[in-house]
Image: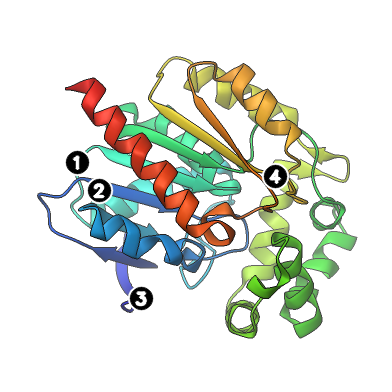
Amino acid sequence: MDSATQVDVNGRRARIFAQGDRHESPILLLHGIGRSLEDWAPQFPHYRQAGYRLIAPDLPGSGFSDRLPTATTLRALAQGVIETLDALGEVSRLHVMGNSLGGAVALQLLALQPDRVATLVLADSAGFGSELHPMMRLVATPVIGSVAARYTATRASARMTERLLYVDQSFATEARIEHALKIARHTDAGVILHETAQILGTSRGVRPEWRTKLLAEVSNHPRPTLIVWGDRDRILPMRQLEAAHRLLPHARVHLFEGIGHMPQIEAEDEFAELTLDFLRSTATAQR
């Protein structure tokens, strides 16, 4: 992967990987809570080879992007992405793909600026159920959560988190663990993780209020949508795929067998084939 760069977005630094020419159709790739743009790196060569331009930011307060001056709400995260796009001079309609919290950010982006969104791909996306792994529920608690979030700067925590994401433990590589540690030790990632988890969840799971409001807003702006899930996701269980399809009945759905929370990594080739077929067939139908 070519190096990501830092751009100035209204006085804050945003880290972004951008590649391709302006005439190419853009794909916007959004990662999950406490993660970074590297979660989409395995898909970069597939989409570039297919002729798409790539835009993959570290969300505000995640990876090596500065935090927002305001609380890290879902709306604020989406607005931060919009500001980043504006700083890049990006005006084309986007194929927006989001994993985990990135899926909820993608939906919020659609609700805020529907004219910017051409299609959606939601991979194991937040927003479709209350169930959540106990570790994330712990981080959402007011006092214990702040202590647990600071623990993310330890090797044991980084290793445990990486292993939770995959069924095939070989994907929890030392390189990915080192990358997570580097972020945790040199940024306020733990603080932002706790703050975001508290806003979006509780010790009982994902809050229903923001989910209900967001999905009501999104229903006013239907877009071609593909929803995918790993059948052995331990962060957001696969039952939420059924809820997602019920709430977005126009969407295509796909269940990856023997795959965890990050199918774009653990099922790299199948994910690329599936999403590219979706984008091509959508373009054909629109023509």
Choose the circle earlier in sequence order: 4 or 1: 1
Q: Mark 3: give few (<14), some (14-19) or many (20+) Cα within 10 Å.
A: few
Residue drawn at the location 56% of the way across and 26% of the way down? 214
Choose the circle earlier in sequence order: 3 or 4: 3
Q: Quadrant of residue 179?
A: bottom right
Rendering coords of residue 221 (x, y %): 40, 19
Disc 1 secondary structure class: loop
The circle drawn on residue 199 is 4
Disc 2 secondary structure class: strand
Choose the circle earlier in sequence order: 2 or 3: 3
- In this rendered view, identify the residue nearer to me: 71 or 90: 90
Rendering coords of residue 99 (x, y %): 55, 49
Residue drawn at the location 62% of the way across and 69% of the way down? 189
Contact check, label 1 and label 2, Cβ < 8 Å: yes
- Residue type (three-letter) at the residue carrying disc 1: Ser
- Residue type (three-letter) at the residue carrying disc 2: Pro
- In this rendered view, identify the residue nearer to me: 18 or 279: 279
Residue of label 1: 92
Q: Mark 2: give few (<14), some (14-19) or many (20+) Cα within 10 Å.
A: many
Q: Quadrant of the N terminus?
A: bottom left
Mark 4–mark 1 Cα distance, whole angstroms, equals: 31 Å
The circle drawn on residue 26 is 2
- Single out the mark in the foreground, 3 or 4: 3
Residue 12 visible here:
no
Mark 1–mark 2 Cα distance, whole angstroms, equals: 7 Å
